[in-house]
Amino acid sequence: GDSVTQMEGPVTLSEEAFLTINCTYTATGYPSLFWYVQYPGEGLQLLLKATKADDKGSNKGFEATYRKETTSFHLEKGSVQVSDSAVYFCALRRAGNQFYFGTGTSLTVIP
Amino acid sequence: EAEVAQSPRYKITEKSQAVAFWCDPISGHATLYWYRQILGQGPELLVQFQDESVVDDSQLPKDRFSAERLKGVDSTLKIQPAELGDSAMYLCASSYGVLQPQHFGDGTRLSIL
């Protein structure tokens, strides 16, 4: 079945460090891919998305490229800030609008 | 602040009791979702509505869980009787259409004693 696998956390980085959170997927067909962010005590917020191969989603300095050949959608940011501390979820959407979420990766950025 | 409204934010109750959660989606959003998020895991879809109709409830434990969206606007998720394993965050989300991004509420954190 369809699934999403994320790198396990927690991840701790110093401010201004480079961030990569790995995400790979298994799916039939051509799903859309998403990154969501969840701040403590809140619901999920859409961070970025890509709907087809080679698309690059970007928002707030974060980027992710839909790589069909490696079935990956890794999240990157060149310089993290303390305010980026949150849990990040990779997700795929297949036909019928069914979403499958990864288990989440907790990021803590220290000053 | 989230635009999808959920209440209550927190609920503590004893096992075997009934609990209910309420969700008011963004105005105009026809599609509404209920998710369960166990601590340390990603959300899992429980039920999806298109207007007032259920389009997917394959993961809803129907012996104890029920969901309704009578007028195609707000929705209620109920658990009766609650079990210890039901402790989790219950998230509601809505979207304008089936292919549009989902907007999440802040969730209801349920603790079963």
Image (cartoon, rainbow, N blue to C red):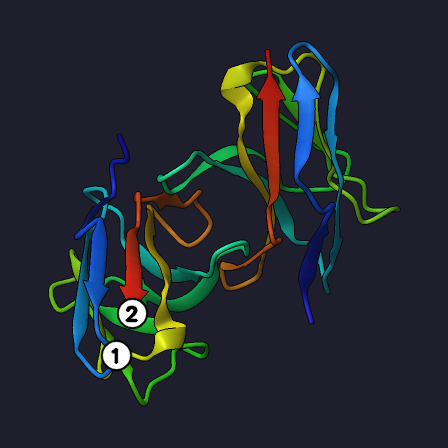
Please provide percent x and percent y for residue A16: 68, 9
Residue B56 in sight: no
**Kind of residue at badge 2:** Ile
Label 2 crowd (10 A; few <14 / some 14-19 / many >=20):
some
The residue lying at 39 percent from left, 61 percent from top is: B35
Specify the quadrant of the image occupied by residue B14.
bottom left
Are discs 2 and 1 less than 8 Å apart at CB? Answer: yes
Looking at marks 2 and 1 on the same chain, the residue that comes earlier in the sequence is marked by 1
Please provide percent x and percent y for residue A9: 68, 42
The residue lying at 37 percent from left, 42 percent from top is: A43
Work out whether residue B99 or residue B25 is closer to the camera in this orientation and state it.
Answer: B25
Q: Which residue is mark 2?
A: B112
For mark 1, name the chain: B
Quarter holding the C terminus of chain B is bottom left
As helix, strand or loop, the secondary structure at mark 2 comes to strand
Work out whether residue A109 or residue B108 is closer to the camera in this orientation and state it.
Answer: A109
Work out whether residue B71 or residue A26 is closer to the camera in this orientation and state it.
Answer: A26
Q: Which residue is mark 1?
A: B15
Describe residue B26's horizontal placement relative to residue B87 as left or right.
left
